[in-house]
Image (spheres, rainbow, N blue to C red):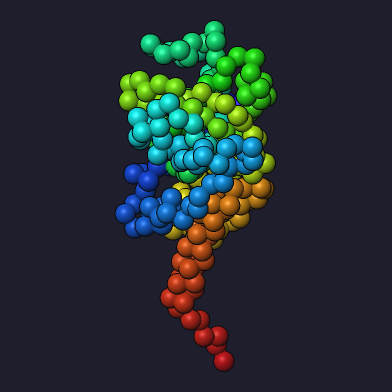
Amino acid sequence: MASGRRDALQALRVAADDLPVRCPWIVAIPLVFGSARSAIQDAPASVPEVDLAELCRQPAEQLGRSARIVFQVHELPATWTAYETRFDAGSYVAVSAWGDYQVLWQKREWENPLALLFARRESAPARQLAAARPYDRFAAVVSVREVFLGRPWLEIERLQPLTDHVTEGCVLHAARAITLMAAGEWRLAREDLARARAGDLPEHVARALEELAAACEAEILVRRKAAPRVVPPR
C-alpha cells in the first residue's frame, strides 16, 4: 500500500469514542449483524460454528477442539513471538485475522485484529495463505492447540476462500461517511455510503451500511421538513 493511501486510511478511520454523543447509530452497528455461515461443506457436522471474537474471549472452553470460523485477512506477518508454543516461524506460517463481525471502518476495530492463526508450512492452508491479500475473507476449520497468555493459539486445518468480503474502498467510504454524519453533512454521507456498498459484501456488512444509509435519509427528511418554506412573491 502506498504511503499516501495508508495516510488516507488512517485519517479517515474513526472510533466510536471519537464521535459525539449525538450519534447513537454508531453503537447500533454491531447489533444488526447476522450470523456468518461457513462455506466449508466437508467439515463434520459435529464441528461447531463459533464467532472468532467469542473463541478469543473464552479459549479454554475450546481447548483441544475444532471449530468453524470466518475471518478476514489483516496481514501475513513474516515473524512473530512464539513464546513457549509450538508455533515457531520455521514450522508454521501465520495470518493476522480480523473477526467477521469487526466493524473495520471504526479505527479501534481496524487497528486491533483479533488473533494470529497458523498453518503448518507446506500444507494446503499454508499454500492458500501464500496467495492471500489484505481484506481477503475465508471460512476455516481451526483447532485450539494451546491457550497461552490468555489467548487461543489456533491451527488452521481447512481453508475455503469466500468471494464476498469488505474491501479497502468500503472501509474508506464508510469511515468518511461516519465522519460526515458526525458533522451533520447527511447528503454527503449518503453519497459515501452508496460507494461503500458497491461490490460483493457479506450480507451482515451490507445490512449495517444500509442501516447507516437509512439514518442519513431520516435526518435529511427531518431537515427538509424543518426548513422554512419560501413563498414566492406575487
Percent across and percent down for residue 191 are 59, 56
How far from the left and from the top, in percent, is residue 114?
A: 44, 32
Whether residue 104 appears in this view of the structure is no
Image label count = 0
Q: Is residue 106 left or right of residue 197?
A: left
Residue visible at 50% across and 50% down in the picture: 35
Question: In the picture shown, does residue 39 fall above or below 26?
Answer: above
Residue 224: x percent and y percent? 49, 73
In the rendered image, the vertical position of residue 28 relative to residue 131, given as above or below: below
Q: Nearer the viewer, residue 210 or 138?
A: 138
Q: Give the farthest residue toward the bottom.
A: 234
128 up-or-down from 29: above or below? above
Name which residue lies at 37% across and 57% down: 24
Q: Nearer the viewer, residue 233 or 183?
A: 183
Outermost residue on the top side: it is 90
Q: Is residue 130 found left or right of 116 in the rendered image?
A: right
Q: Quadrant of the C terminus?
A: bottom right
- 1, 99: nearer the viewer: 99
Query: Depth check: 150 or 32 in front?
Result: 150
Q: Residue at x 51, y 63 (%)?
A: 214
Q: Quadrant of the N terminus?
A: top right
Q: Is residue 32 something that shows in the picture? A: yes
Return the x and y of residue 28 as percentages of the image width and height.
40, 55
Q: Residue at x 43, y 50 (%)?
A: 30
Left or right of 176 on screen, residue 21: left
Q: Residue 125's image quarter?
A: top right
